[in-house]
Amino acid sequence: MASGPASAAPAASGSAKAAPPAGSAAPDGKKADDKDKGDKDGKGDSKDKGGDKELPAEAALNTAKVGETGALSHDRGLFKSAFANPDFGKAAQVKVGFVLTNISSYDIKEGTFEATFYLSLTSKTPMPDPLNLIFPNGKVDSKDALADRPTFKLFRVTGTFRSPPDLRRYPFDSQELVIEVEENSKGVDQLRLSADPEHTRLDANFAISGWDTKYLEARSLARDMPPRFENDDMYYGRYMARIGIARFGTSAVFSVYVPGFVIVIIGLLAMWVTPDEMEVRSNGGAPMLAGAVLFHFSLIQSLPATSYLTRADKLMIGVYLSLLMNMISTWFFFIVDEEKHDLVFKTARIVVPVLTTLLMTAMCIS
Amino acid sequence: MTNHAPNHAQPDAGEAKPESKKGTGLPEPIRWAIRILILPFVAASIFFACGSQSKDFDSRGKVVRVYVNRKDEAGNPLVTDVEVLYTGCGGEVRTVIRSNVDFSKCALTKLKAGEEYPLVLTRAKKRDGHFGTTIVKLGECVRVPDPTDSRSYTTIRDCSELKTDGILVGTHCEVFPDPKVLALCPWFAEQ
């Protein structure tokens, strides 16, 4: 791995600074003249001046040295990465405030949701400039800068974010909606993010239809990336807001469990149909089975494919097995002698309901 | 009331009785099952009928802010918001209440930010047509809840530090009335 000493290759070595550091951030982070006001594409705060696109990490790149392989690196500071900025000074300790105003269009099948929130960045010392905030798990529709000062920035962000759902407990499931924010051009040598507990809140009357909001969590971490290029040893700050939501319990019971139990109970009524009404008895199970299949089909239509069984799936397995027991008890009449019909009838009337109760209980609590 | 029933009606009724018992057609276990199913509905109806009665609660809250939201041309307050921090619920439970002229006059003269006052809550109709519990008296100030009020709201926030490997990495805030809050302030169960 070439660290790029200046003497290694005269043609390629030396500073990578090809042009005056027009876009370089001074250690104090001030660059009031050419501030990018409100990058609305959500792809960061990179600048474009007169056709010369200024990269967000220009200051760091300008101080890097070119090695034999052409890779950039720094030989000072904590990191060798081309994105390190040993001249920046002490990293700005940035407190991130997050106020969530709205979440809508939560699609559990796709795991997507639309969110609107305010994001504030406050630090005692100036932040590097420009910031290149990205949202790794989402696509931002608008990012309006309401304040953009070296030590204080406030954005109003609207976008679509993605969080894979966990449906093991469906329909009594709880989901965690995550919004991630990352500065991926300024590493932790310039910027360290931390959650601001006092300014991590939900807006007044915040609600997500169909769900109870349980908690709001904010955490920050420093993460590295798989080496994308030589000397890619930089850590980057990431902020994560997590919103815990739980499906309305009453809705879950009435939309999933009640239909399931109604199918089972109506199926069980066939146990009291006497053998002389065999046609009625044998025809009772099929509509219930068709009803169960259609109901199950409608349930899974609204969910993504999973590699595990949800609680609703387990309930439906119980329903299918209960209906199967009903049918088996009816088929028994066709394979036993007629004089034993009364015994089968009485036995099935006790055994099937008891087994069904045990089965459904097991499926509900498993 | 005179009974005009013909005399021969009695023997007919006597004959019909065993037929009607037989005519139900349902086996005994099913009739029992129906009775068992009906019983919870009756019990639930009684429970909800009794449970829906109005109940007042007493608590205490610290006034965080008194804000005159609207004044008349003479500068007299018409509508005032008072932000109250419940002191006995645990966590950070805040309510912003808005009310009318009478409440405004009282709030501006008798409520001071930073002071703690007794408060009374009662059941009242909300904007969405459902019932919730709201403040009707704060200190000496009586508030008449307006069902069209869309400004008043409550936020619940019970935060704790989030640590990984013993290092502080963030904050976790419960924003739903958990059992701990409900034990101290049971009226939030109805919000």
Image: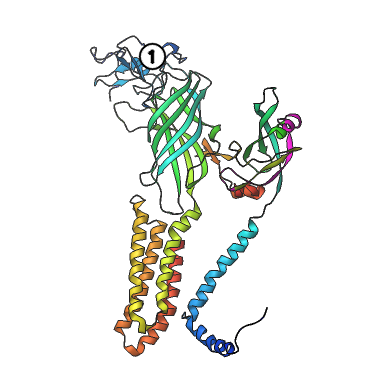
Point 39% across, 56% down: residue: A310
Instruction: Assess whether residue B128 is covered by the magenta stretch.
Output: yes
Scheme by which the image is coloured: rainbow
Point 35% across, 90% down: residue: A339
Q: B5 and A295: which one is in front? A: B5
| Location of residue A265 with respect to A144 vertically, above or below | below
The magenta-colored residue range is: B105-130
Q: Can I make out residue A197 in this image?
A: no
Which amino acid does the dot numbered 1 rest on? Answer: Ser
Q: Kindly identify which residue carries mark 1.
A: A24
Q: In the shown orientation, is residue B101 left or right of residue A81?
A: right
Point 31% across, 31% down: residue: A227
Report the chain holding disc 1. Answer: A
Q: Can you say which quadrant of the picture contains the N terminus of chain A?
A: top left
Q: Can I make out residue A225 in this image?
A: yes
Q: Can you say which quadrant of the picture contains the C terminus of chain A?
A: bottom left
Q: A285 and B94: which one is in front? A: A285
